[in-house]
Image (cartoon, rainbow, N blue to C red):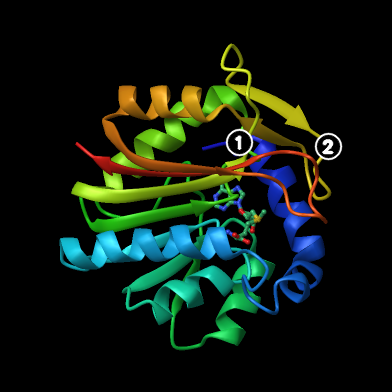
Amino acid sequence: MIEPDFLRTTRTAYDAMAERYAELFADGLEEFPLDRAMLAVFADFVRTDGGGPVADLGCGPGHVTSLLDSLGLDVSGVDLSPEMVAIARAARPDLRFEVGSMTALDLPDDSLGGVLARYSIIHTPPEQLPRVFTEFHRVLASGGRLMLAFQAHDDPSELAESFDHKVALAYRWSPDRVCDLLAETGFTETARLVRAPLQDERPFPHAHLLLSKN
Ligand SMILES: C[S@@+](CC[C@H](N)C(=O)[O-])C[C@H]1O[C@@H](n2cnc3c(N)ncnc32)[C@H](O)[C@@H]1O
C-alpha cells in the first residue's frame, strides 16, 4: 500500500530531532503534575479492570511508557519514527518498542486493556482521525481504556485548527468534537481535564480525555 504523505513527513521530522526531543524530556514529566495525575488515573482504571496489556502509541523516546511501567502496567510502545524507537529501546531494553503507525496497527483485535496516545494524534490530518479512532477501537478489548492528550482549542464549530508546531504541521483539536467522534466510533467518555498552558508552552489549552470502549 502507498504510504500517505503525512506519515512520511512526520517520520522524517521526528527522526531528525529524536535525540533533542529525548533530551527535553530527560526529567520525565516532572514539570507536568496534572499530566502525571491523569496518567495515574488511567493506570488505576486499567489495573482495576484486570491489568491487560497497554500500548503507548506514538511513544516517542519512551519516557511515558517507562512511567506507565512504573505504575504497574504491562506496557509497550509503538512509534512511527525508527530513531525514536531506537532511543526508547536503548533507554529501556527491558520494555518492548516497535516501529509502526497508529493508522494501521500490527496488533490483534480486542487484545489491549489500554491505549495511550499522548500528543501523537496531533500530526494526523482531520479527515484521517476517524480511521485512527477505529484502529484504537479495534485493538482494545471491550471496556478497555483510552487516554488521549493534545493541544486544544475552544471553538466547537471546528474539529481542528492547524498550528505551526516546531517539528511538523500539527493540529489542535476541540475536546467536544473529538469526544463526539469517539462516541460515534464506540467509546464512552469517563472524564476530561483541560489545563492552562505552562509558562514555556504556547498559549493553547491542553486536553486529556479518558474514555472506555463500549
Ligand atoms: C509530540 S511527540 C509525543 C511523544 C510522547 N507520546 C510524549 O508524550 O512525549 C509525537 C510522537 O508521535 C509519533 N507519531 C506521530 N504520528 C504517528 C503515527 N501515525 N503512528 C505512530 N506514531 C506517530 C511521532 O513520531 C512522535 O514520536
Q: Residue at x 48, y 25 (%)?
A: 176
Question: In this orientation, which residue lies closer to the viewer: 118 or 153?
Answer: 153
* x, y percent for residue 126: 59, 25
- What residue is shown at x 36% (from left), y 60% (from top)? 41
Q: Is residue 30 above or below residue 152?
A: below
Pointer 1 residue Cβ closer than 8 Å to ligand 1: yes
Image-quarter location of ligand 1: bottom right
Residue at point 41% right, 70% down?
A: 76
In space, the residues marked 1 and 2 are separated at their CA atoms by 14 Å
Q: Is residue 109 visible?
A: no
Tell me if label 1 and label 2 are in contact, CB under 8 Å. no
Image coords of residue 184 (percent x, y): 32, 22
Q: Is residue 134 above or below residue 114?
A: above
Q: Residues within 10 Å of mark 2 (few under 14, many from 20)?
A: few
| Label 1 or label 2, whichever comes before in sequence order | 1
Q: Judge from the rendering whether residue 99 lies leftward or rightward of residue 147; answer left or right.
A: right
Q: Nearer the viewer, residue 34 or 63?
A: 34
Mark sitting on residue 164: 2
Q: Residues within 10 Å of mark 1 (few under 14, many from 20)?
A: some
Residue 69: x and y in percent read 40, 78
Residue where numbered disc 1 is placed: 124
